[in-house]
């Protein structure tokens, strides 16, 4: 996957945390080519930086309805795919 400009579609988190999430996603895209590896990288990095338990969903087409902790949710487009990040648990 290429590193692409992120488009934030929906977010419930601080601007700083949004930027950190986008930066983390781009780092994952630079290091990995397989979606499950990208998701695992982002999840682990957010767990380290903001404490567990983060969830990362990546794909070209998916629908979601999730419960998340307040101020810990972002949905972004990266190139042809989307990434949903949220903390719950």
Image: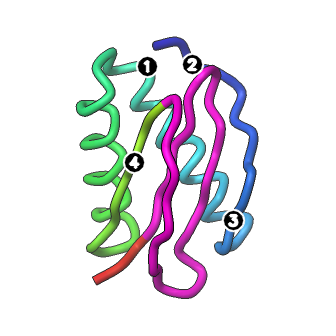
- Label pair 2/4, CB-CB below 8 angstroms: no
Outermost residue, bottom side: 70
Q: For numbered disc 4, what is the local secondary structure?
A: strand
Residue to which mark 2 is pinned: 3
Q: Earlier in the sequence, mark 3 or mark 4?
A: 3
The residue shown at (72%, 60%) is 10
Taking the image as shown, residue 48 lies to the left or right of residue 71, namely: left
Find residue 45 and name its label: none
The C terminus lies in which quarter of the figure?
bottom left
Q: CA distance from mark 2 to mark 3?
A: 21 Å
Frontmost residue, 83 versus 52: 83
Q: Is residue 49 above or below residue 42?
A: below
The magenta stretch spans which residues? Answer: 60-86
Of residue 58 and residue 72, the one placed in the foreground of this image is 58
Confirm or deny contact between disc 1 and disc 2 (CB under 8 A). yes
Which residue is at a point 46% across and 13% down the rendered structure image?
1
In the rendered view, tell whether residue 27 sits above or below residue 12: above
Query: Which mark is first along the chain, 4 or 1?
Result: 1
Q: Which residue is mark 3?
A: 11
Where residue 71 sits, quadrant-wise, is bottom right
Q: Which residue is mark 1?
A: 30
Residue 71 is covered by the magenta coloring: yes
Query: Which residue does the numbered mark 4 point to in the structure image?
Result: 57
Spatial distance from mark 2 to mark 4, Cα to Cα?
A: 17 Å
Alpha carbon separation for disc pair 1 and 4: 18 Å
Q: Earlier in the sequence, mark 3 or mark 1?
A: 3
- Residue at x-position 60% and y-position 64%: 17
- Which circle's residue, 1 or 2, is located before the other in the chain? 2
The image shows residue 74 at horizontal and vertical percentages of 60, 60
Whole-percent x, y for residue 34 in the image: 28, 20
């Amino acid at each position: 996957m290429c590193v692409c400009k992120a488009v934030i579609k929906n977010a419930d988190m601080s601007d700083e945390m949004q930027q950190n999430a986008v930066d983390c996603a781009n780092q994952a895209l630079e290091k990995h080519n397989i979606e499950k590896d990208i998701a695992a990288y982002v999840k682990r990095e957010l767990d380290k930086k903001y404490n567990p338990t983060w969830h990362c969903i990546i794909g070209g087409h998916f629908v979601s309805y999730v419960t998340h902790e307040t101020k810990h949710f972002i949905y972004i487009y990266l190139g042809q795919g989307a990434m949903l990040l949220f903390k719950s648990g």
